[in-house]
Amino acid sequence: MKALILYFSQTGGTEKIAKAIQQGLEETGNDCNIIRIKDTNMEQLKVHDLIGIGCPTFYYREPLNVRHLIENFENLNGKHCFIFCTHGSIIGNTFYYMNQLLTEKGMIVIGAFDCYSASSLQFYPEIMHTAGHPDDVDLEEARSFGRKLPSIREQIIGGETHLLPKFELIENTWWARDSKMMTLDILRKISPKLMINADKCTKCMTCQENCPVDAIDVNQEPPEIQKEGCIFCWFCEKICPESAIEADWSAMRASTRPVLKKYVKILKEAEKKGIFRPLVEYEKIV
Ligand SMILES: Cc1cc2nc3c(=O)[nH]c(=O)nc-3n(C[C@H](O)[C@H](O)[C@H](O)COP(=O)(O)O)c2cc1C
């Protein structure tokens, strides 16, 4: 079997999981190519038997660049795929929406894997509750998932359709309500405006090359940032080597502080169920 893994990763968590799943697939004698979502084309999808698609959770669901990628797929007529994601405290409806989009393109999701991962957002403390993940235990779980995929696929082909995963839309929680409200318009209104400081910018292109949706043009005068299509991931500000991208996070920082307690509550419940292993003393994170 020839597998292809497509992944979107900014801070490296999803990339580690993608590579661990690839290893697992290869350990069972299968070919597995791996590419970034930005480098994907339809021809590659057509020549592989199994497609994996992985991304971080953004705003309790799949990031918009991933949504747009799948929306642009041609119909793939029953091709098998699996989905994976990394997230901080709340995976939200990421898998539900990914499955919905893939199903609309004729694909059949045969497995899903998710994993906690260090979360870094400018308006949260530098160390968050899920810091340290994915660790070796998570990576072994991802490899094991990869090793199992070929036999699950064979069983499903053999008629054991009860093995197909099911994904339910969660609607009656505070985060599900927040998620519904977080349209691009709202994000544009509530988030601070990023500015390129022309005195510091050396036009090194790091921000432009790493923007997942090509919403930056540093060669414009003045340089343009957060153009139409920006998905509010704020990665450009994080990676600018000159700290030339600036924003005032104070209001957002203050308004999101109360949410930290809610994250701890959710993680403690996950810990009780054996789903989450804290690697930092998360009660100190305030
Ligand atoms: C814009 C943005 C939104 C995020 N939203 C969520 C979220 O809703 N739930 C969550 O658990 N983590 C959220 N995170 C954290 C990421 O899902 C997490 O850090 C992920 O593992 C990053 O993957 P990467 O290292 O592959 O880039 C968000 C991160 C960013 C940058």
Image (spheres, rainbow, N blue to C red):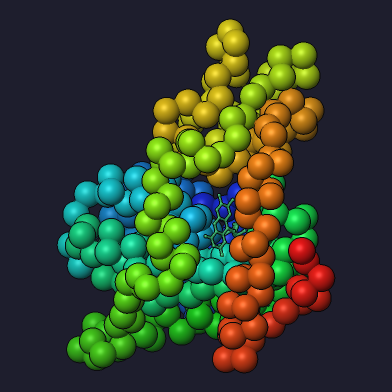
Q: Position of residue 74 (x, y in %)?
A: 22, 49
* In the rendered image, the vertical position of residue 143 relative to residue 211, given as above or below: below
Residue at coordinates 63% horizontally, 45% vertically from top-left?
A: 252
Q: Position of residue 38 (x, y in %)?
A: 47, 43
Furthest residue in direction top, as rendered = 221
Q: Nearer the viewer, residue 244 or 192?
A: 192
Decide if residue 272 is on the left or right side of residue 97: right
Residue at coordinates 71% horizontally, 41% vertically from top-left?
A: 250
Decide if residue 160 is on the left or right side of residue 276: left
Q: Nearer the viewer, residue 157 or 227?
A: 227
Q: Position of residue 260 (x, y in %)?
A: 66, 65
Decide if residue 241 is on the left or right side of residue 77: right
* In the rendered image, the vertical position of residue 184 relative to residue 2, given as above or below: above
Residue at coordinates 20% horizontally, 67% vertically from top-left?
A: 78
Q: Position of residue 3 (x, y in %)?
A: 41, 65
Ligand 1 picture quarter: bottom right
**Quarter of the figure with the N terminus:** bottom left
Residue 63 in view in this figure: yes
User: Residue 109: which quarter of the image?
Assistant: bottom left
* In the rendered image, the vertical position of residue 3 relative to residue 64, given as above or below: below
Residue at coordinates 34% horizontally, 45% vertically from top-left?
A: 68
User: Residue 173: which quarter of the image?
Assistant: bottom left
Q: Nearer the viewer, residue 46 or 116?
A: 116
